Image: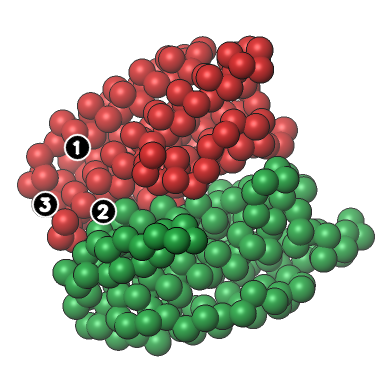
Chain colours: A red, B green
């Protein structure tokens, strides 16, 4: 691997989305063993004013999708309507397919491109592609992936850092 | 910002370490307002088999320090003996100074260098510098920074994603 927009963005997203998909398998096994309703797990939060688990996974997917979409054009919208871990796994798979759909050349060419993106409900920000990935996309992506993981740890799913890093 | 080892590693670390330092100020104000013993906060965990807050902050610092240290030579050890939020802020400041101590040229030259690092208590792994940063250092760094943030959110510190991104 050399350092490129593809290695920094695409490869990061694929590593962690793949890891998250396997983590959802362990969450499903945990729900079955402990008779936990998946619908309850999907609505579990670390604290009442944070997003629930389902939204953390959706946002992890969306930061990957929107990053590559904005680097190259306009990202599609994926509806937020998952009701089960299997449906969340399908959302991750759909996101992985989307991320894999770009050529390295298209992504790499966007390093110096102006990218305008929403920050909060009312504002936008414009950064060069490389800075957008490093200073905005990656911290947001990992923020939601980690918080999804943290919710599962708190409800007792047997996962560790190796799972988060995709090394299992 | 162009895409370089420096922009991907150094700039990421500095953005989030700076953000974390300001978050600790809000945590200290919260402790004072709610009469929470800082020593108790430092030992607070999301769940009993995860590291406490103090260790999450120390590990965030260490993934920054060790990444740049290993890219260029051998990182120093910083002792894990913080007992208060001020001492944790000092640990972050010391880490920021260390991170700023490298020239861009030194970091950028390490993209293709073999980097050997510990994974778990007994094993090591060797990756090229660029891959080490993208596939290992950043996910670990953001994992611990986010989990530190999540612990503070769970105990009621009034912070939001803007704080995590250093945009306050």
Residue for point 55% across, 52% down: B146
Residue furthest right as drawn? B35
Q: Which chain carries label 1?
A: A
What residue is pinned by disc 3?
A: A109
Residue for point 15% across, 46% down: A107
Percent coordinates x, y for residue B9 in the rendering = 34, 67
State the SS at label 3.
loop
What residue is pinned by disc 2?
A: A8
Percent coordinates x, y for residue B162 in the rendering = 55, 53
Percent coordinates x, y for residue A167 in the rendering = 37, 44
Is B71 left or right of B160, judged from the image as shown? Answer: left
Quarter of the image where one finds residue A1? bottom left
Badge 1 and badge 2 in a common chain: yes
Is B36 left or right of B130, judged from the image as shown? Answer: right
Q: Earlier in the sequence, mark 1 or mark 2?
A: 2
Q: Which chain carries label 3?
A: A
What residue is pinned by disc 1?
A: A73
Residue for point 50% across, 14% down: A84
**Residue closest to the eye, B106 or B14:** B106
Percent coordinates x, y for residue A30 in the rendering = 58, 22
Quarter of the image where one finds residue A100? top left
State the SS at label 2.
helix
Quarter of the image where one finds residue B22? bottom right
- Look at discs 1 and 2 and give the one toward the viewer: 2
Q: Do the residues labelled 3 and 1 touch (CB within 8 Å)?
A: no
Q: In this view, does B123 lie above or below B66?
A: above
Q: Earlier in the sequence, mark 3 or mark 2?
A: 2
Q: Distance between the residues labelled 1 and 2?
A: 19 Å
Residue for point 45% across, 75% down: B65
- How packed is label 1: few (under 14 Cα within 10 Å), some, or many (20 or more)? few
| Residue A128 seen in the figure | no
Q: In this view, does A27 lie above or below A151?
A: above
């Amino acid at each position: 691997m050399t350092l490129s927009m593809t290695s920094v963005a695409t490869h990061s997203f694929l590593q962690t989305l793949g890891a998250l998909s396997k983590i959802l398998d362990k969450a499903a096994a945990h729900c079955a063993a402990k008779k936990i309703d998946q619908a309850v797990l999907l609505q579990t939060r670390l604290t009442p004013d944070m997003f629930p688990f389902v939204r953390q996974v959706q946002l992890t997917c969306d930061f990957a999708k929107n990053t590559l979409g904005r680097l190259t054009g306009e990202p599609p919208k994926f509806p937020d309507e998952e009701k089960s871990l299997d449906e969340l796994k399908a959302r991750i798979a759909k996101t992985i397919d989307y991320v894999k759909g770009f050529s390295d050349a298209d992504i790499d060419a966007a390093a110096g491109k102006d990218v305008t993106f929403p920050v909060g409900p009312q504002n936008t920000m414009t950064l060069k592609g490389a800075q957008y990935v490093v200073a905005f996309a990656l911290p947001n992506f990992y923020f939601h992936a980690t918080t999804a993981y943290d919710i599962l740890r708190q409800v007792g799913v047997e996962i560790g850092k190796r799972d988060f890093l995709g090394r299992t």
